[in-house]
Image (cartoon, rainbow, N blue to C red):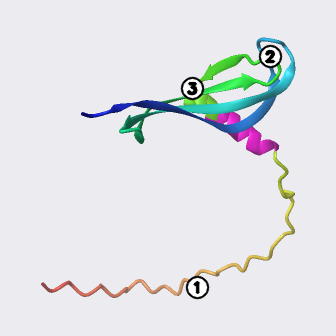
Amino acid sequence: MIIYGWRQQVKQLATATYLCGQCQNPTAHALRRAVTKFTLFFIPLFPIRSRYFTVCTFCGATNKLTKAEAEQVMATQQGAAPQPPQAQPPQSVPQIQPPAAGGQFGRQQPPAPRG
Ligand SMILES: [Zn+2]
């Protein structure tokens, strides 16, 4: 007898603050991913499908997202994190001078491969 089924795992990916479409409050929204995994003998083997959604921490409204939208939310959240200053001191990069053109047109041909 084979016992199989599926199990859903919900993982919180990020938290983003924006205006909620439900309660119109600028609240934090938890970005979560729900992965449904196929299980065999209660052992999760491989994901069947995954979906993304946000949960408003104020009113609890859920909003379905596409994967691209979820990645966008994660990107904006990373952008809000403190970053090192962009201004860097000018570095003196040694310029590699090209060899002076001495009119050496008679270049040697590479040896023909023998095989
Ligand atoms: Zn809300």
Horizontal side of 16 relative to 115 (left or right) equals: right
> Image point 73% across, 31% down: which residue?
30
Q: Position of residue 99 (x, y in %)?
A: 57, 84
Asked whether residue 79 is drawn in magenta, I would say yes
> Image point 36% across, 39% down: which residue?
41
Q: Position of residue 69 (x, y in %)?
A: 62, 29
Amino acid identity at mark 3: Thr
**Residue bearing mark 1:** 100
Estimate the spatial distance between the alpha carbons at disc 1 and disc 3, rounded to whole Å: 57 Å
> Image point 27% across, 34% down: which residue?
2
Query: Along the polypeptide, which appears first: circle 1 or circle 2?
Result: 2
Q: For residue 95, what is the image quadrant?
A: bottom right
Q: For residue 74, what is the image quadrant?
A: top right
Pointer 2 residue Cβ closer than 8 Å to ligand 1: yes
Pointer 3 residue Cβ closer than 8 Å to ligand 1: no
Question: In the rendered image of this protein, does residue 56 appear above or below residue 70?
Answer: above
83 or 44, which is in the foreground?
A: 44
Question: Magenta region: which residues?
Answer: 71-80
Query: Along the polypeptide, which appears first: circle 1 or circle 3?
Result: 3
Q: Are marks 3 and 2 in contact (CB under 8 Å)?
A: no
Question: Predominant secondary structure in magenta?
Answer: helix
- Mark 3 secondary-structure assignment: loop
Estimate the spatial distance between the alpha carbons at disc 3 and disc 2, rounded to whole Å: 21 Å
**Residue bearing mark 3:** 66
Q: Quadrant of ligand 1?
A: top right
The nearer-to-camera label among 1 and 2 is 2
Question: In the rendered image of this protein, does residue 102 appear above or below residue 71?
Answer: below
**Residue bearing mark 2:** 59
Question: In the rendered image of this protein, does residue 40 appear above or below residue 18?
Answer: below
> Image point 77% across, 44% down: which residue?
79
Asked whether residue 40 is drawn in magenta, I would say no
Question: In the rendered image of this protein, does residue 81 appear above or below residue 41?
Answer: below
